[in-house]
Image (spheres, rainbow, N blue to C red):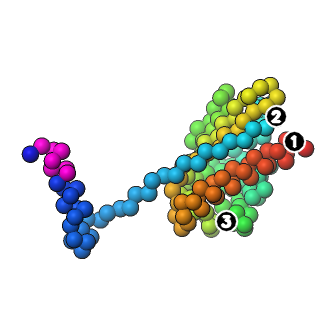
Amino acid sequence: MNLKHIALMSLLAVTHAPAKDAAANHQLEVVKKPLRVDTSAEFPLPAEKVWKLIAGFDTLPDYHASITTSELSEGGVVRKIGLTEPAGGGHVVERLVYFNDETREFSYKITDLIKCRFPLRNYQAFVRVESLSETSCRVHWGSVFTVEGATEQEGDDLAKIIYQGCYDGIKRVLMK
């Protein structure tokens, strides 16, 4: 009997075992498949102007209406942002995991939630500002995450609402 057959027989034994025996012999962990959300918005603004606003890791309160504060630590790679009550309240701690000024892109992940009703877990966001011409650009904002305490659709909707808040703030601040 080869390894493939042994693995198949083991899998069949676990999946067809009576529930009480399977529970007694195996601790099965439910693994949630990460969701991916990709959004983008076009602006009649030079890419560098938009990048200058959003590239600072502590600038979210400057343009996102749901972010009340941002405190940097660990040399500027960790931020603790305060949320308005409607946005979940409390604080979200995020770590910058990638930053490239030349290509105008960065990525960050949530590392902690403090007194916050935020259902997205294992969250990592990706941001890129793409130049379309000298006077226009497209901002890409997306993420991967799992959801806890909400449906996948609610998690998807929440991520899109967050990014729309970023886009609305960019317009409000730079297109006065």
Q: 10 Å neighbourhood of mark 2: few (<14), some, or many (≥20)?
A: some
User: Is residue 138 rendered magenta in the image?
Assistant: no
- In percent of width and height, residue 41 lies at 72, 41
Residue plotted at (72% across, 36% down) = 138
Observer able to see residue 71: no
- In percent of width and height, residue 28 lies at 31, 63
Depth order, front residue of 89/35: 35
Residue placed furthest toward the top: 134
- Check disc 2 and report its element: helix, strand or loop: loop
- Dominant SS of magenta comes to helix
Q: Which mark is residue 88?
A: 3
Q: Type of residue at label 2?
A: Leu
Along the polypeptide, which appears first: circle 1 or circle 2?
Answer: 2
Q: Which mark is residue 96?
A: none
Estimate the spatial distance between the alpha carbons at disc 3 and disc 2, rounded to whole Å.
Answer: 31 Å
Depth order, front residue of 61/158: 158
Observer able to see residue 148: yes
Residue named by callout 1: 175
Residue plotted at (80% across, 25% down) = 134
Q: Type of residue at label 1?
A: Met
Say whether marks 1 and 2 touch (CB < 8 Å): yes
